[in-house]
Image (tube, rainbow, N blue to C red):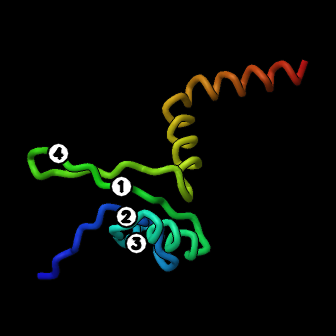
Amino acid sequence: MKQVLLGRYKVATWGTEDSDVLDSRMFDELEEAISFGESLGKPYFLMESIFDDNGSYSWRLLDYGGARLWKTGTFLYKHRLAVALFGLACIMRMTK
């Protein structure tokens, strides 16, 4: 069984062959993670690990790479009904 070394920062991006696979690499230094992400030449996400007292961890999305696009998409999805109603109201107003 292989073990994965957990770094403080993770750079993740979708694989080129299969959009169902998320590739990632971990780093101990933020500068290394940013440099690697920018060298990919495609959208990436940069995250920082957050540990709790029970040995579990989560990843906080940092404002690099595709973070703004992800956050905007998440916001729009959360408020999709309001966005749809606003869009419909604009279309109706334009057709008058």
Single out the mark in the foreground, 3 or 1: 1
Residue at image coords 52%, 71%: 35
Mark 1 Cα within 10 Å, few/some/many (few <14, many 20+)?
Answer: some
Q: CA distance from mark 3 to mark 1?
A: 16 Å
Q: Earlier in the sequence, mark 1 or mark 2?
A: 2
Q: Position of residue 83 (x, y in %)?
A: 63, 28
Q: 32 or 4: nearer the eye? A: 32
Compared to residue 45, the image places residue 60 above or below, namely above
Q: CA distance from mark 2 to mark 4?
A: 17 Å
Q: 7 or 59: nearer the eye? A: 7
Mark 3 element type: strand
Return the mark for residue 36. none
Mark 2 element type: strand
Q: CA distance from mark 3 to mark 2?
A: 10 Å
- Name the residue tied to disc 2: 10
Point out the residue furthest to the right here. Answer: 96
Q: Position of residue 8 (x, y in %)?
A: 30, 61
Compared to residue 29, the image places residue 63 above or below, namely above
Residue at image coords 56%, 59%: 65
Compared to residue 7, the image places residue 96 above or below, namely above
Return the mark for residue 48. 1
Residue at image coords 36%, 55%: 48
Point out the residue furthest to the left here. Answer: 54
Q: Is residue 42 left or right of residue 86?
A: left
Q: Earlier in the sequence, mark 4 or mark 3?
A: 3
- Name the residue tied to disc 3: 23
Disc 2 residue type?
Answer: Lys
Q: Are marks 1 and 2 in contact (CB under 8 Å)?
A: yes
Mark 4 element type: loop
- Name the residue tied to disc 4: 52
Q: Are marks 3 and 2 in contact (CB under 8 Å)?
A: no
